[in-house]
């Protein structure tokens, strides 16, 4: 080891563990400001699909988090080692922005530097934002893309961005700038989550056409939130891209007089003014959220998306049933007007493919959840989404969580998806499955 | 028999009844005054406590929790309270923000780090137990003098110190509905007006829990706090011990601290 490397390591240790260095306390992960979790997940599908004959998928995740407060603010890093036996994870890549179709074995999930001056807090780095008051779906929460490699177990992806938060009493204003566009990670072609194209449907599908990563790709968002007389209210605005694909249609001449449709996946540029609220009436929490999704480029329809619901908690107090929580929501999406000559394919209820191109299960949907807290350590949860748009389709999940110790948790359950093959949920009708996850926190 | 013959007797009975009533009311204001004075003298502008909680099961198995509790005394005798768990790992950074409201109509938000956003919750669970401990949410709140009726029962020594023994019962319909108790019996030290013991009686008037305050410390002026509080559930045989590891008062915490920004930190 060179002298310079030795000095660099010493400096790193000194930076990470001032407490351990200053007193004689033993060197532990906690003294280094490190914590984490190790997770093993296993999914057992009951059926194969034409795309996917693998019934069992196993996944391992080791997540490490380091955080420290300094005189000038705070720093936080969340890194993840991950692998699975399906092929969701492949290679080791560090990209800004992340555009790989696969997950990397090693990922920086979040990395932030935060500084505060009076009422203003500025955060730079890879961040995850969470806006809105609804449970199932947030029309005002548009900044982060998602990892949809497993549709039913999707997760938010961090984005490199700068944000400022001004807090004045109960009122806060957040402003975020995202210089790069990161698309959502879509299901792999060979996976059960990519729907089978109906027989007889012929089209040329191009590679996705991402926006140029120049100044024009910069996205902005702001949210003003306050509490007045027991009501939380906020207004928000997003100017950026949809993270999922739309399809621009054109025709290719295959032979004289024979034209084949050509679909070019593009990302719509949208402006999304929105608002949300939450309040309580006795034991009832009531919330609502709505946003106008106005197309600026590469989109077909100006839409309104809304969701409202109630949350009711009943304290039971029996020996093996402590508490029940009931959540009911209704979500609706309405086309306000059509963009002329957009050339973008209708995603919902299209000829030949039905809802196979649709990316929203909340066009006319009822969402429900019943959560039974059996004891302090054991919870049972039954959730369901009914998409009632034209032909109904359903997703139901039954999940149980048990805390074996404070550090060791296990969760297991069943996913059921039903509906006709060309409906929103029905396209995954062969993906009913059992799942189990064991989590060790340290 | 004429009714008039009984009129003087009835009047006497009413008068006697009235005088007994006067005597009872004379006692009640004294108990209420003590409780009001207690709330006044032990109130500080703001407070920060680091607490270690030990949960002991009937069989003797223990679990530990750690938290930081911030409190800001507000106008109208209404407080703002922020509780943030620091251990164990599975509840770390879970936080609960409460703005006390008039007549118990509080605003409450819960932050779960996995969800990454605060959620307004209905503050209906006051009688519910706090994070698996033997304390209900209402047990951890400052005494709500306006929502309770107090009655002096007797005087009794606890650990050699003379105490007022006061019964507290819900004074409003809302308090009766929100509270898990029909009655609480309080032992209030006569010298410092610190409550050193509480007995909690359930809705069927049966003794449910006994709370003991130990290691009293003077924190500022006439304000005292207990560094150890033990709650024993006499029905289930469990107990919870709160040990205050550190405390700071009147540091100048501002309203801005008790907001969403701090809740999600």
Image (spheres, coloured by chain):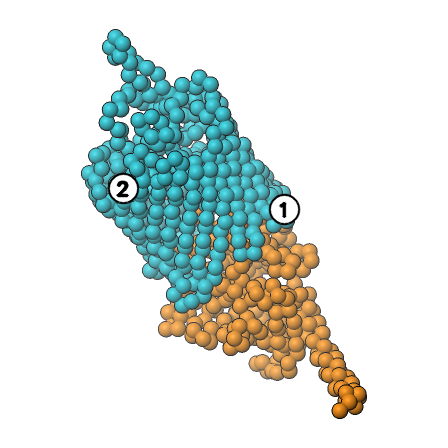
Chain colours: A cyan, B orange
The residue closer to the viewer here, A385 or A204, is A385
Residue lying furthest left in this view? A53
Horizontally, residue B150 falls left or right of residue A50, namely right
The residue closer to the viewer here, B147 or B143, is B147
The residue beneath circle 2 is A431
Quadrant of the rendered image containing residue A252? top left
Say if B259 sits above or below A259 in the image.
below
Location of the N terminus of chain A by quadrant is: top left
Is any part of residue A80 visible from this angle?
no
Residue B9 in the image: state x and y as whole percent. 77, 89
The residue closer to the viewer here, B72 or A73, is B72
Horizontally, residue A295 falls left or right of residue B81, namely left
Label placed on residue A228 = 1
Residue lying furthest front in this view? B1
Q: Secondary structure at mark 2?
A: helix
Residue lying furthest top in this view? A256
The residue closer to the viewer here, B160 or B107, is B107
Horizontally, residue A438 falls left or right of residue B140, namely left
Residue B184 in the image: state x and y as whole percent. 58, 73
Residue A218 in the image: state x and y as whole percent. 48, 26
């Amino acid at each position: 080891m060179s002298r310079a490397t030795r000095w660099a390591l010493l400096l790193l240790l000194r930076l990470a563990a001032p407490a351990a260095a200053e007193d004689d306390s033993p060197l532990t992960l906690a003294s280094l400001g490190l914590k984490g979790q190790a997770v093993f997940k296993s999914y057992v599908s009951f059926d194969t699909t034409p795309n996917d004959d693998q019934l069992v998928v196993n996944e391992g995740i080791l997540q490490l988090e380091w955080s420290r407060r300094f005189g000038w603010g705070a720093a936080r890093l969340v890194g993840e080692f991950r692998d699975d036996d399906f092929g969701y994870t492949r290679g080791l890549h560090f990209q800004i922005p992340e555009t790989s179709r696969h997950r990397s074995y090693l990922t920086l999930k979040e990395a932030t530097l935060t500084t505060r001056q009076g009422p203003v807090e500025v955060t730079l780095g890879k961040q995850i934002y969470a806006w809105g008051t609804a449970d199932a779906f947030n029309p005002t929460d548009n900044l982060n893309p998602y990892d949809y490699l497993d549709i039913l177990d999707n997760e938010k992806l961090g984005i490199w961005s700068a944000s400022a938060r001004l807090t004045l009493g109960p009122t806060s204003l957040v402003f975020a700038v995202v210089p790069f566009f990161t698309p959502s990670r879509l299901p792999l072609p060979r996976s059960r989550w990519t729907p089978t194209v109906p027989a007889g449907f012929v089209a040329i599908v191009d590679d996705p056409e991402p926006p140029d990563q120049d100044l024009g790709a910069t996205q902005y968002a702001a949210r003003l939130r306050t509490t007045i007389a027991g009501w939380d209210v906020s207004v928000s605005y997003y100017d950026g891209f949809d993270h999922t694909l739309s399809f621009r249609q054109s025709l290719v001449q295959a032979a004289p007089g024979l034209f084949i449709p050509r679909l070019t996946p593009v990302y719509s540029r949208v402006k999304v003014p929105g608002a949300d609220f939450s309040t309580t009436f006795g034991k009832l929490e009531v919330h609502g959220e709505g946003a106008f999704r106005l197309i600026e480029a590469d989109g077909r329809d100006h839409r309104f998306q809304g969701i409202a619901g109630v949350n009711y908690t009943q304290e039971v107090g029996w020996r093996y049933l402590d508490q029940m929580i009931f959540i009911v929501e209704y979500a609706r999406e309405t086309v306000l007007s059509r963009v002329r000559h957009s050339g973008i394919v209708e995603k919902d209820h299209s000829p030949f493919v039905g809802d196979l191109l649709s990316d929203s299960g909340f066009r006319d949907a009822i969402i429900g959840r019943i959560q039974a807290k059996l004891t302090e350590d054991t919870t049972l949860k039954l959730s369901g989404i009914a998409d009632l748009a034209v032909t109904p389709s359903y997703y139901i999940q039954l999940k149980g969580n048990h805390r074996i110790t404070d550090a060791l948790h296990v969760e297991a359950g069943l996913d059921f998806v039903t509906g006709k093959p060309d409906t929103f949920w029905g396209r995954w009708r062969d993906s009913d499955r059992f799942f189990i996850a064991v989590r060790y926190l340290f | 028999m004429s009714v008039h013959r009984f009129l003087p007797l009835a009047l006497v009975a009413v008068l006697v009844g009235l005088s007994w009533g006067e005597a009872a009311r004379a006692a009640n204001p004294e108990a209420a005054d003590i409780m009001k004075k207690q709330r006044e003298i032990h109130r500080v502008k703001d407070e920060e406590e680091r607490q270690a909680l030990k949960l002991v099961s009937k069989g003797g198995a223990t679990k530990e929790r750690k938290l930081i509790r911030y409190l800001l005394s507000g106008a109208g005798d209404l407080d703002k309270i922020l509780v943030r768990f620091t251990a164990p790992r599975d509840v770390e950074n879970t936080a609960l923000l409460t703005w006390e409201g008039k007549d118990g109509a509080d605003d409450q938000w819960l932050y779960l780090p996995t969800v990454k956003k605060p959620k307004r919750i209905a503050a209906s669970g006051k009688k519910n137990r706090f994070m698996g401990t033997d304390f209900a949410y209402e047990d951890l709140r400052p005494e709500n003098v306006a929502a309770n009726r107090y009655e002096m029962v007797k005087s009794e020594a606890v650990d050699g110190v003379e105490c007022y023994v006061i019964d507290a019962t819900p004074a409003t319909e809302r308090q009766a509905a929100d509270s898990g108790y029909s009655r609480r019996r309080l032992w209030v030290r006569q010298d410092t007006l610190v409550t050193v013991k509480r007995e909690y009686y359930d809705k069927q008037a049966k003794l449910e829990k006994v709370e003991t305050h130990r290691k009293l410390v003077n924190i500022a002026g006439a304000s005292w706090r207990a560094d150890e509080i033990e709650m024993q559930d006499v029905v289930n045989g469990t107990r919870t011990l709160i040990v205050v590891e550190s405390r700071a008062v009147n540091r100048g915490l501002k309203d801005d601290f008790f907001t969403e920004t701090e809740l999600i930190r």
